[in-house]
Amino acid sequence: MTMPRDADLGDVHTLAGAYALDALSEFERAAFNRHVGACGSCALELAELTETGAHLATLTAAAPPPRLREGVLAAIARTPQERGRRPEPLTAARSEQRWRRWTAAAVAAGIIAVGAAVGTWSVDQQRVRDAHAQARQVTDLLAAPDVRVRTTTVDGGQVTVIVSPSRNAGVAVLDGLPAPGSAKAYELWLIRSGKPEKAAVLAAGQGTATVPIAPIDNAEKFAVSREQKGGSPSGRPTDVRGGVEL
Amino acid sequence: MTKPGEAGKPAARLSAVPDPAPDPARAADDLLRRVARGDEAAFGKLYDLVAPRVYGLALRVLRDPAYAEEVAQEVLVEVWRTAGRYDPARGSATAFIFTIAHRRAVDRVRSEQAGADRTRRVGAASVDTPYDDVVEQATARLDRQQVRRCLDGLTELQREAITLAYYEGRTYREVAELLDTALPTIKTRMRDGLIRLRDCVGVTGG
């Protein structure tokens, strides 16, 4: 089976330019933040490239409507400022801590957005709780020292796989895959020594989900297939839509 | 024979042709530090200095004056609210502000506009937007000319990749598709293009 590998974040360092230009998805952003937290030269490069990017805003300057000034000044007069966030001297540890916090926030925002999208058709507290639990799961995993984040595109949707061998745990995030129809479902697979093993089956018709895929057990690949609802009866993938090396 | 009162003038003539205006970037750093202490008057001055660039960037990315105005207002209120997070050791105030502005505009364009609609509008506006006297005062013209020159000094692929991402709010995946170029190449061109731009505009340290 073919494994498109269009965004191996293993070479995450090269994402600095795209990051500074806000050209990454939330998950790639989160992965890059983590990388920067552990890489001092990257943090410097990123600061410089962000500074450089900001210069680009000089080329598009345009006079705002005069009412904007009044509107903004009125708004700030009634907006309290954040308290207790005075910057402390930046030590490596603090920088790492800060990046982790940003990472966690970015990822949580992504997951909760996914949960909210699912929840538009039924306001359901359980779903919101699930979304928060999923967000915790992902942020927790991202804190693992050996975490790897892989993303790929499957039928126009985005698939992100986060795995930590040391915790033997992983989470797959499917975002915006085309709905497979009410009689079909996406099934997730982990491939060990070339042999696919079922990791999870999504609900019929679902194309957006956050799913734990533990245990990882040295799997070398992750794949998504389309099956009849409930999953492939043969226990082997029938219609592989895509995948990524772990 | 030097007349009384003329002492010192020759030295003044040795400086650059126009009187050196206060460096707008440094002025912004100072103002933002004062804003962090709740100084509303400083915020008014900071507004005059950066609002044309915040609004212009939002307008460029969103292509809609009403959205641009909304986003600019959100961004500027956010600057007021979070000014305490600004750390001069980590970068300039303008980078702090335009980073918030760009992120907001990009988030908005990605959530608001359907792909087809955006595709149709690609290239509909040039990088330059109308520029008036108010803006002229606020923005260092030399900086503008220099950035333009530096952008022109990039390879075509570097410039297109950076322009599509920054001014259109495209992800690097979209840029790769639009330019029919492999993803790793686009990632690399964005990075080495920005590095070349950094060396050209003379950004030092964060």
Image (tube, coloured by chain):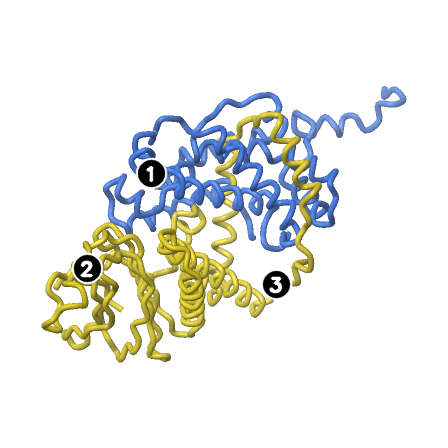
Task: Tell whether A131 sits left or right of A237.
Answer: right
Three-letter code for the amino acid on which mark 2 is drawn: Gly
Task: Tell whether A144 sits left or right of A4.
Answer: right
- The residue that disc 3 covers is A90
Element class at badge 3: loop
Question: Which of A170 and B54 lies nearest the eye of the viewer?
Answer: A170
Residue at 19 percent across and 67 percent down: it is A230
Task: Tell whether B190 sits left or right of A78.
Answer: left
**Dots 2 and 3 on the same chain:** yes
Q: What tint does the image give chain A?
A: yellow
Q: Which disc is residue B114 wearing?
A: 1
Q: Is residue A78 visible?
A: yes
Establish if B181 lies above or below A225.
above
Q: Quadrant of residue A175?
A: bottom left
Give the foreground label among 2 and 3: 2
Residue at 60 percent across and 40 percent down: it is B76
Element class at badge 1: loop
Q: Callout 1: 10 Å neighbours few (<14), some, many (20+)?
A: few
Q: What chain does badge 3 belong to?
A: A
Establish if B150 lies above or below A185.
above
Report the Cα–Cα distance between label 1 and label 3.
Answer: 41 Å
**Dots 1 and 3 on the same chain:** no
- The residue that disc 2 covers is A242
Question: Which of A136 and A84 lies nearest the eye of the viewer?
Answer: A136
Image spot of residue A59 (x, y percent): 49, 31
Q: What chain does badge 1 belong to?
A: B
